[in-house]
Image (spheres, grey):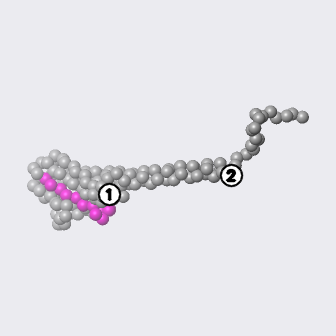
Amino acid sequence: MKKRLSAPGMRHQRGVSLLEVLIAVIILALGLLGLAGLQLNALRNNQSSMERSMAVVESYSIIDAMRIDRENALSGGFNIELDADPTEGSFAGNEIAKWRNRLQDALGEDATGSIACNGAVCTVTVQWNDERGTGGSSSQEIVTEVRL
């Protein structure tokens, strides 16, 4: 028969105690809660980033329409304030109305845009509500200045 050698005063321990398992489960649960919070912030920031990208895309879409009808754009035919309603019937009015509808589809019901041309330099502004984003204010604005 073999005898096990052990240090004096040491008890033989087999397996893991229930308390050690409970502590491990609590630490694991806290880690998973942290990961869930991190995932939530990542999703919010991803949505906010996508909205900024869509605002830039829509800015360039109206700028392309202004380049199609350059003479009208240079004379102020595309100019519109943020809170003004576009007057449909002309190419510029129809394009602005479609542009504003696309802004609302992509960025929400509060989204709007303005255009201000001063000679050959035009400024396109897009505003929308980004209250779900984690790092920004609820009102976001992208301003694009272009020379036609």
Q: Horizontal placement of 147 versus 40: left or right?
A: left
Q: Position of residue 77 (x, y in %)?
A: 13, 58
Tell me the magenta residue range.
102-117
Q: Is residue 71 visible?
A: no
Task: Nearest to the eye among marks 1 and 2: give it.
Answer: 2
**Residue 116 found in image quarter:** bottom left
Q: Which residue is mark 2?
A: 18
Residue sitting nearer the eye, 142 or 117: 142
Q: Which residue is mark 1?
A: 130
Characterize the local packing of mark 2: few (<14), some (14-19) or many (20 or more) Cα atoms within 10 angstroms.
few
Element type where label 1 sits in the image:
loop
Task: Say which mark, if any, is on residue 26.
Answer: none
Q: Is residue 109 magenta?
A: yes
Q: Position of residue 74 (x, y in %)?
A: 11, 52
Q: Horizontal placement of 36 versus 84: left or right?
A: right
Q: Position of residue 41 (x, y in %)?
A: 42, 52
Give the mark, 1 or 2, whose residue is nearer the N terminus: 2
Element type where label 2 sits in the image:
helix
Q: Position of residue 88 (x, y in %)?
A: 19, 66
Question: What residue is shown at x 17% (from left), y 65% (from top)?
Answer: 84
Residue sitting nearer the eye, 65 or 103: 103
Furthest-right residue in view? 1
Question: What residue is shown at x 12% (from left), y 48% (from top)?
Answer: 120
The kind of residue on which mark 1 rests is Asp
The kind of residue on which mark 2 rests is Leu
Question: What residue is shown at x 66% (from left), y 51% (from top)?
Answer: 19
Residue sitting nearer the eye, 108 or 79: 108
Question: What residue is shown at x 53% (from left), y 49% (from top)?
Answer: 31
Characterize the local packing of mark 1: few (<14), some (14-19) or many (20 or more) Cα atoms within 10 angstroms.
many
